[in-house]
Image: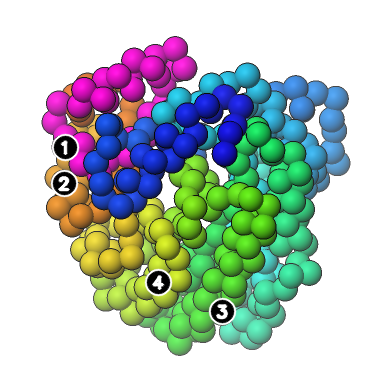
Amino acid sequence: MELQGKPDFEEAMQRIDAWFAGEKTDRPPVRFSEHNAEYTGGPALAGRTWPDLQARWFDAEFQVDSFLDSIRGKRFYGETFPVFWPNLGPNAYAAFHGAELEFGEVTSWIRHCVRERSDLERLKFSRDNGYFRKIEELTRLAMEKCAGRFLVGYTDLHGSLDCAVDWRGPQRLCLDLADDPELVRALVRRADESFLPVFDHFDALLKAGGQMSVTWMAIPCRGKMHVSSCDFTHLVSTAVFDEFYLPSLRAEVRHLSHNIFHLDGKGMLRHLDRILAIPEIRAIQWVHGVGDDAPILQWLPVIRRIQAAGKGVLVDLALRELEPFLDAADPQGLYLCIAAPESVQPDILKRLEKW
């Protein structure tokens, strides 16, 4: 595959393939952008108006053209790729079942729709759902315009307990775990019913268009790759994790060829051993947080624990942390995400080769 601004595409893919396999190459893979740092539209916004924010989000031509404006003339160094992933926010999968989204400038929120047990029966996945059809439209339009310019990914999908909390709300779901665990089980079953079929639908759509498996993390894969996560479980015990989430996670990762787990913050560390014990999970994205949690070096014991389990580790580094981190860390299995200006990226690559 050849992309404008990415002449070393195949070389970068060889490093990613080796990273997934736990093999060493000339240097660790590096993405020159923080995760969750979105491309922002430029000239595509000029002269366009919409009656409300949802209309802007639903304007497929604007979304794709805005992305094209954001990558025009850019050079993508290291394992950085131009990836358009159709996006209506992190709760899209829950919305595919009939819940409603509220849209802001840069993200969306879901209206918790299960207030009574009877509300569960109204949650039904449908391919005629407006949010589902819009993600399909965004995907197809992007594939029409992407040739030689960018990759097209699939949308952010959250099933199991994270989907249940979308429908029920975090406070109610926490209380349900004590007062009505059968309702929680029913919500998780409903979330699990369509999750893998929905993933397969978009995976097949992309593969038919010659695309790879890639989503918001912008790590392409020629197999079937997913970023599993359940941020809600930072609120619960290991016993709750084992009963209400672990079966869903195991079924999810066994269905796919390449799996990365998004471990978001120190509240998730109580579950780390259980996640590391799953052989199909090939890597952990460690998100250490902000404020007092921000200095990366304090989390070296966690990174080494993941490495000792034979898993890859993705970490976000501030540019000022790069040298101290390289002095202290073992490069085996690491994938670095560094927000760095384009002017210094070639020098960073040279430094990583010496590492």
What residue is shown with label 2? 304
Query: Which contiguous range is marked in magenta?
Result: 327-355
Residue 347: in sight, yes or no? yes
Q: Position of residue 46 (x, y in %)?
A: 80, 23
Badge 4: residue crowd in 10 Å (few <14, some 14–19, many ≥20):
some
Pointer 2 and pointer 4: residues touching (CB < 8 Å)? no
Of tags 1 and 2, the one toward the viewer is 1
Pointer 2 and pointer 3: residues touching (CB < 8 Å)? no
* Labels 4 and 3: the sequence-earlier one: 3
What residue is shown with label 1? 330
Amino acid on which the number 1 mark rests in the picture:
Asp
Q: Which secondary structure, mark 3?
A: helix
Residue closer to the observer: 28 or 117: 28
* Labels 4 and 1: the sequence-earlier one: 4
Pointer 4 and pointer 1: residues touching (CB < 8 Å)? no
Q: Residue at x 84, y 30 (%)?
A: 48
Residue closer to the observer: 74 or 210: 210
Q: CA distance from mark 1 to mark 2?
A: 8 Å
Of tags 4 and 3, the one toward the viewer is 4
